[in-house]
Image (tube, rainbow, N blue to C red):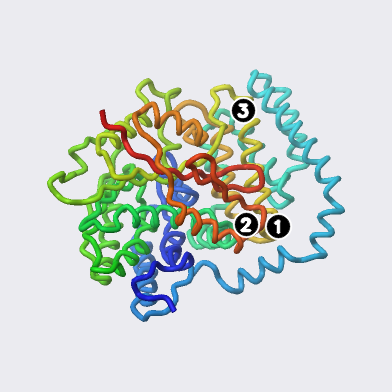
Amino acid sequence: MRKASDPPEPEEEVVADRIQNNGKNYSSNYQYDSNDYLEEGRSKKQHSISDSTHLELLDDAFLHSIENGVPIPCPLHDISRIAAYNKFLHDGQLAASRVRMRTLASKREADMWTQLILCAEAAGSGDRKTASAKLKQIRQHSSPFGDANQRLAHYFANGLEARLAGTGMLLSGHVTQNSSTAAEILKAYELYVTICPFRKMTNLCGSRTIARVADKAASVHIIDFGISYGFQWPCFIYRQSLRPGGPPRIRITGIELPQPGFRPAERIEETGRRLKRLADRMNVPFEYDAIAQKWETIQYEDLKIDRDRDEVIVVNCMDRLKNLPDDTVVQNSPRDAVLKLIKRINPDVFLHGVRNGSFNAPFFVTRFREALFHYSAYFDMLEANAPREDQERLVFEREMIGRDAMNVVACEGAERIERPETYKQWRMRSLRMGFRQIPLHQSVIKKVKSIKPDYHKDFIVDEDGQWLLLGWKGKIFHAISAWKPVQE
């Protein structure tokens, strides 16, 4: 039996996935708001009273579970859904059918990729006639309802069409002409969480690392770049409430890009109120500050760091710096500006999660090829883990993966907001800006790896140097690292 002072098991750490993943579909402003899939501004809905009520109900369910001492599973891992997907994965007849069809599928895939690249080359050179002819051929063999390759081709064709039309960011209207509701997007994300371990692993790694750093601290100040709804923190607060000798004082500075309208900080201010309510119910001293502005404009003084206070300082940023303009867009890189600010903060640990990608080349055809390879792995992952007729899979591919891919293909300059770098590029940037990498604790890595057996065998959990890597087959999607500034 687990004692009250023992750390919760991994499945408990993602209880806030109910909050985390339900809330993720209420983002606004595609250009500015980005945090993993559903927080990448994918929904067109503004924050509303009904959204707030929904989030409070989810918080209440979380509190009810811990206050009644019952095990805290991830609510999104619905038993019937898991059973259905397990049956899908282990259906021997289906597996045999896939083997028989593989040779034909491989030939079709090679042909489709050739046509897509030829179309991209024509579009890149300004040969609209050839590009339009190739696009017409691609449309005959692509479909959002087909196999993984046909679905991939459908969205890349949409991106090429928008590029040829010069519509750029206006393509979002074309993509979502059959607009999904918030409830439909939520169900789609439930599918993603059920079949893919990345969010669970990322949250567990971050929370466990912070808990180790703040093990003896009387106070911990977490500066979260990209807090959005704060879905990682309820479980962290809960774990700290069980700490022998009592919990520390937890202070969170939530940082986001401003929402459009008259109340740019409305959503993250509400995040603070929700987290305060949860912390009060768990008897954890809690403070919260909200900052909603472009990150490169934030000043050290805005963070209200009290060096006279005996507190551990943590900076957290998961998968969010990829959407800041890079050196090719503006002369003074906002990415470097944020890293300079973090260095001045001088945190006890800087946790940086990277969305690993090599499709940020300034040359269109090079970028197109890399993006095609990258996003094909996502569609392949969904093909292997969810039935083709699954409506949630269709919505997830359209509203999240498809939009990202089309932004890469259709947009240039400031309109192209999908600008990932590889974790090796981020390593060089961080070293250049005056950071040194520190290893993630082996007990944390072991916990993360213990999640893998619950999912498809082709998911990757690996290490490279001091990076924790998460991916599918040969493609790395996420990389997690820990850093400390080098003080001269």
Question: Which amino acid, by three-letter code, is at mark 1?
Answer: Arg
State the image quarter where residue 138 is shown: top right
Task: Using the image, determine if residue 85 lies above or below residue 373.
Answer: below
Question: Which amino acid, by three-letter code, is at mark 2?
Answer: Arg
Which of 162 and 289 lies nearest the eye of the viewer?
289
Q: Position of residue 46 (x, y in %)?
A: 38, 52
Q: Position of residue 136 (x, y in %)?
A: 74, 34
Question: Which residue in the protein does label 2 denote?
Answer: 393
For the N terminus, the image quarter is: bottom left
Task: Using the image, determine if residue 191 lies above or below residue 351.
Answer: below
Q: Is residue 37 visible?
A: yes
Question: Which residue in the protein does label 1 denote?
Answer: 388
All told, the count of numbered labels is: 3
Which of 478 and 256 lies nearest the eye of the viewer?
478
Task: Using the image, determine if residue 455 lies above or below residue 60.
Answer: above
Q: Mark 2 packing: few (<14 Cα in 10 Å), some, or many (20+)?
A: many
Q: Earlier in the sequence, mark 2 or mark 1?
A: 1
Q: Residue at x 28, y 50 (%)?
A: 222
Q: Secondary structure at mark 1?
A: loop
Q: Position of residue 390 (x, y in %)?
A: 66, 61
- Are discs 2 and 1 less than 8 Å apart at CB? yes
Q: Secondary structure at mark 2?
A: helix
Q: Secondary structure at mark 3?
A: helix
Question: Which residue in the protein does label 3 denote?
Answer: 164
Kindly report the distance in space between the C-alpha atoms of the residues bearing marks 1 and 3.
30 Å
Q: Going by the image, does 134 lie left or right of 196?
A: right
Q: Going by the image, does 228 lie left or right of 137?
A: left
Q: Is residue 176 visible?
A: no
Q: Position of residue 91 (x, y in %)?
A: 77, 66
Q: Residue furthest front?
A: 442
Q: Residue at x 58, y 73 (%)?
A: 79
